[in-house]
Image (tube, helix red, strand yellow):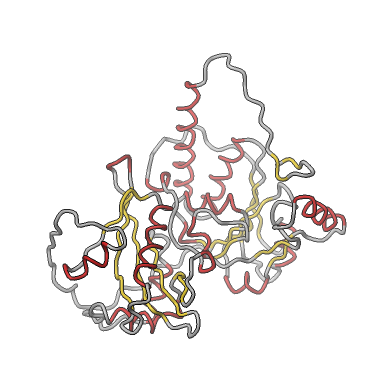
Amino acid sequence: SSVASLSSASSCDADAAFDATAAARSGPLLAPSATSMPSTQDFLLRTAEPRDFAAMCELLSQLTVLDGPCGPPTRGDWERMLAGAAAREQSIVVAEDAHSGALLGTASLIVEHKLVRGCGRVGHVEDVVTHEKARGRGVGRALLGRLAELAREAGCYKVILDCADKNAAFYEKSGYRRAELQMRLDLGPPQRGARPPAPAPSKRVLSLLSASTEIVCRLGCAHLLVGRSHGCDDPPLATALPVVTAPRVDPNAPSLQLDEAVRAQAAAGGPIYQIRSELVRSLRPDVIITQEQCRICAVTPEDVDAACVALPSTALVTIMPVTLDDVLGDVVTIAAALGAPERGRRLVAHMRARLGAIAPLVPAGAPAPRVAHLEWLPPPVGG
């Protein structure tokens, strides 16, 4: 095999101590894909990218001062900010002119986790600005609308922002209302000195399975993800990652046609999915996660081996759960591969505690329901 392999279908340690930490409670994060965002006739909304650095500086200079004690922000600062946005649950949205490609505006949303309101979440809107030459086109209201959608997806119960009195009427048109009073303590400029160092290198994770993408995020390791499969669309932050796989059949075809196409592809002995090998190599993953459960459902280890021969030092984590205990065991396996074994144990303990809380609610001797899980109709294909 061209990649170092690690596989598990075993159960996890049932005696791990329960600890409802933030990692165990993490839910939808933020960083939507450009293709999923709404557009108007003359501009579209998308996630900010490294190439936007100069345009972002021009936009934000119309809002406030860019220079700090260490000078103006650099392209490296911008790239590090974007790289850490998912871990901070920050979404930076820009409006792009559909014709010229110029940036017309930007706004950011940061999600705050609270202990009150049942560990509720609050969205903070920051740095809302429309280019002075693009005002009156509805850019600002579109940006605020998108941030409100992201806040709902993240489970926020409210969104708050600070603004000058003169701008209050603008925000009221987007549904905001005046509430309470802002208090501020000015701490002065940060201590002068060298610019903060870049974060220490960490594992670069490529997830080729939607379930493993969700597990990585529930472990609080979303910031390690560098790519995903075409099927990874939850939590929302995953949709901003590069897509390295594509089905060789049309997934939007009618059920019967899809079934025939899949069976024909399988009978021919070829892979059901294409792996974009050059993109995978450019992402330089330290860990690739896939499955060995079904060659029709997702990319297999054999597919990865064939496509990634130039990645001999990459660890391949293969999961093949059959039972619920196997699924919990795979959480531990993935956590260990990410270098966060304790997070895996805590998350599994939290999940077992939730399962344990349900069991007493089932009446003794109650008949178990009969459940059928089907992938598609017709013909019936079990999932």
Residue 220 location, x and y as percent?
A: 44, 52
Q: How many marks?
A: 0
Above or below, 376 relative to 310: above
Residue 34 location, x and y as percent?
A: 51, 69
Above or below, 25 relative to 302: above
Residue 227 location, x and y as percent?
A: 56, 64
Residue 83 location, x and y as percent?
A: 43, 68
Q: Residue at image x 29%, y 47%?
A: 114
Q: Is residue 247 left or right of residue 267?
A: left
When asked about the image quadrant of residue 81, the answer is: bottom left
When asked about the image quadrant of residue 69, the answer is: bottom left
Above or below, 319 relative to 177: above
Between residues 141 and 257, which one lies in front from this camera angle? 141
Q: Residue at image x 30%, y 70%?
A: 128
- Position of the C terminus, as image quadrant, is top right
Between residues 211 and 256, which one lies in front from this camera angle? 256
Between residues 192 and 294, which one lies in front from this camera angle? 294
Q: Is residue 340 left or right of residue 253?
A: left
Q: Residue at image x 67%, y 70%?
A: 276
